[in-house]
Image (cartoon, helix red, strand yellow):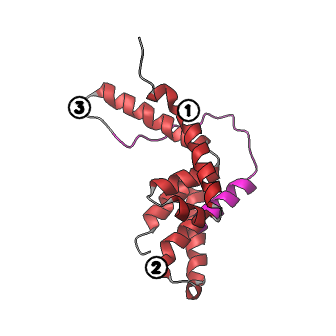
Amino acid sequence: MTDSLPHALAFAQSLLSHRADAEDIVHDCYERLLTKSGLYDLPRDGTKLLLKSIANASINFVQRRRTCTSLGVQEAAEPTHQSDTDPYRGAIHRELETAIAHALAALPVNQRAVVELRSLGHSLLEVADMLDISHANARVLLHRARTQLADALAPYLEENVT
């Protein structure tokens, strides 16, 4: 659990839209976990409990937050890869990164949590346990998320037929 902060923060930020909210959730979850450290075997289960706590806190946060209508344009995700050899490939890569970020952001938070935990290498049984849902529900959430992502990214994944 000692090196879990970067992963915990990245996980929380993938579930929430603002970094400050993610940092607050991670801080609160660390505090709660450490306060109750006598009840748990932190060297063995600490990371799992932390991710479970972050997922639940993020879901609660999103469900409790009042929906506000924004007149501003949503910022595009910052690209993480710069192609210094081929500007055309770099532009395509940035466009795809932005499309993926928008597709992930459009997912409900519980679906995003399942996708993110699976991408971190956790089995579906572990994901279900972390999110306090049944294995069948975790499978359904993952299927729905994948379907929605496939639909949103279809223009980028289909071969160009001319």
Q: Is residue 117 above or below residue 1?
A: above
Residue wearing tag 2: 44
Name the residue rendered at 73%, 54% in the picture: 63
Asked if residue 116 can be seen in this view, the reply is yes
First-in-chain label (3 vs 1)? 3
Name the residue rendered at 38%, 43% in the picture: 80
Residue placed furthest toward the front: 136
Residue placed furthest toward the bottom: 38
Type of the residue with mark 2: Arg
> Nearest the camera: 8 or 132?
132
**Mark number for residue 85?**
3
Magenta-highlighted residues: 53-81
Q: Check residue 54 for magenta coloring.
A: yes
Q: Are marks 3 and 1 in contact (CB under 8 Å)?
A: no
Total marks shown come to: 3
Mark 1 is surrounded, within 10 Å at the Cα level, by few (under 14), some (14 to 19) or many (20 or more) other residues, namely some
Q: Are marks 3 and 2 in contact (CB under 8 Å)?
A: no
Residue wearing tag 1: 152
Foreground disc of the pair 3, 1: 1
Element type at marker 2? helix
